[in-house]
Each structure stands twice: as C-alpha cells, then as structure tokens.
Amino acid sequence: YVKEHIYRNGGVLNGKDLTRWYEGDGVTVRALDQVSFEILPGEFIVVLGPSGSGKSTMLNLMGGMDRPSEGELYYREQKISDFTSEQLSDYRKDAVGFVFQFFHLIPTLTAKENVELAASITKGARSAGEVLELVGLSDRMKHFPSQMSGGEQQRVSIARAIVKNPEILLCDEPTGALDSRNSIAVVKLLLEVRERLGCPVVTITHNAEMARVADRVFHMKDGKIVRVETNRCPVAAEELQW
C-alpha cells in the first residue's frame, strides 16, 4: 500500500456482495449479507438501522478492521479484501480516520499530545495545532481529557482522526454519548471537515434525525442494505431536532 499512488476518478470505497458470518456453538450468524455500495469523493453518508442490522460490521470492513467472508472490497483500485495483515495495518494507519462513540483518548496525554501521537505514525500529517484550531479547541490544547466536556473530548477525537489527512472518515455513533446540543455541534463539525478536507464521511447511527444532513442514506436491516435514499436537499446541522 502506497499513499502517494495516483488513482483514476471513481469511488473511494467500493463493496461488492460483501458477506460476513461468524461461527459459534454450532450456529452461523450472518452479520452482513451480500452488501454492495459505492462511496464517492466528498459524500456525507449516513448508515441508518437498529442494533444488529449490520452497521458496525460494515464499518469494520470499510476500515480494514475485519475481513469479509465473501465478496470484494476496493479502496480506489486496490482490493482490500486481498490485503495482507501488514497492508491492512498501513491502510488503517494512512488512509482511514476513525471517530468513536466513547472518544478513546489517552487520559494521561493533553489534547495536543493525543493528536500529536496520531500524527506521528503517518506520513504527510497536518500539525496538531492546526487541526485543534479547526475543531475550535485552540484554547484547550494543554487540557487533559478529564478537564474537558464530552463534546470537547469528541472534538479532540475528530482532530486526532483528521490530523493524518485521511482519504475517508469513518464515524461509529459519534453523537451516541452526547447531549442534544453537543450532538448538533459534532454533526456540524463533521460537515465542516468534509467541506475543508474533501474526504467522504461515513457515519453509522440508529438516530434517524441525522439522515437529514446526509447526501445519501443507507438503510440497513438484517445484514442488508434494504434501501438507498438520495437526499437532494440536505439540511444544515442547526436544523436538526434532537
């Protein structure tokens, strides 16, 4: 995997008939069932569905944290589903930014140090100060996570994800641990990040309200994408009713 490779235009991520099953106690659980999709440059995608619908499994495959049991997954023109473990590690490190529900910040490091740590493991990273300013935390760089609100900690998490200039940003229930005011602020920030960096943002959620800001919505049920909704007039984050 080489980040500097020049690709032709097209989808950033493409999945074809992706299936993921798990074996246990003589039972086969089909978590993802022949799912196909294309993620285009600059899109804001919301993956919507109840618990157990396959959202997290699909996000794990997109992020190179798991492999499909069947089907094909491409990053640009590279077949991720055939990557070695080392190639998958490089893909996660250099191409993908992750934002999690519960932040996963290192408590003994300041906001700036948390972001600097992420920047240190990839080439061509931005400066920690630059991205913390972008997420509105230029005055909180020296604070530890315990000294910050949940909304501020999620902003640090987003800064950590984008400091490495990711090709795609994957968000796992990014507002799940926040109140309504901070949830709307985080959605607004993710939309701004998409505009500033130009990378597609894929967000999984069970909150149907977030679908109103998306370019496209993947509705999931029982391990399948049952419907893809194109939103011709996405609303601003401030219009969301949490």
Image (tube, helix red, strand yellow):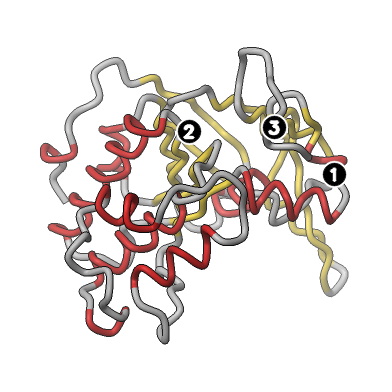
Mark 1 or 2, nearer chain start: 1
- SS assignment at label 2: strand
Residue pictured at 24% horizontal, 18% vertical: 233
Residue receiving disc 3: 75
Mark 3 packing: few (<14 Cα in 10 Å), some, or many (20+)? some
Question: Is residue 87 or residue 120 the one in the foreground?
Answer: 120
Q: Which residue position is annotated with label 2? A: 218
- Mark 3 vs mark 1, CA separation in Å: 11 Å
Residue located beneath label 1 in the image: 83
Q: Secondary structure at mark 1?
A: loop
Instruction: Please say if 24 is above or below 162.
Output: below
**Closer-to-camera residue (22/131):** 131
Asked whether the beta carbons under mark 2 and mark 3 sit within 8 Å of each other, the answer is no
Residue 236 shows which numbered tag?
A: none
- Binning the other alpha carbons within 10 Å of mark 1 as few (below 14), some (14 to 19) or many (20 upward) gives some
Marks counted in the figure total 3
Horizontal relation, residue 138 to residue 32: left or right: left
Q: Which of labels 1 and 2 is toward the front?
A: 1
Q: Nearer the viewer, mark 2 or mark 3?
A: 3
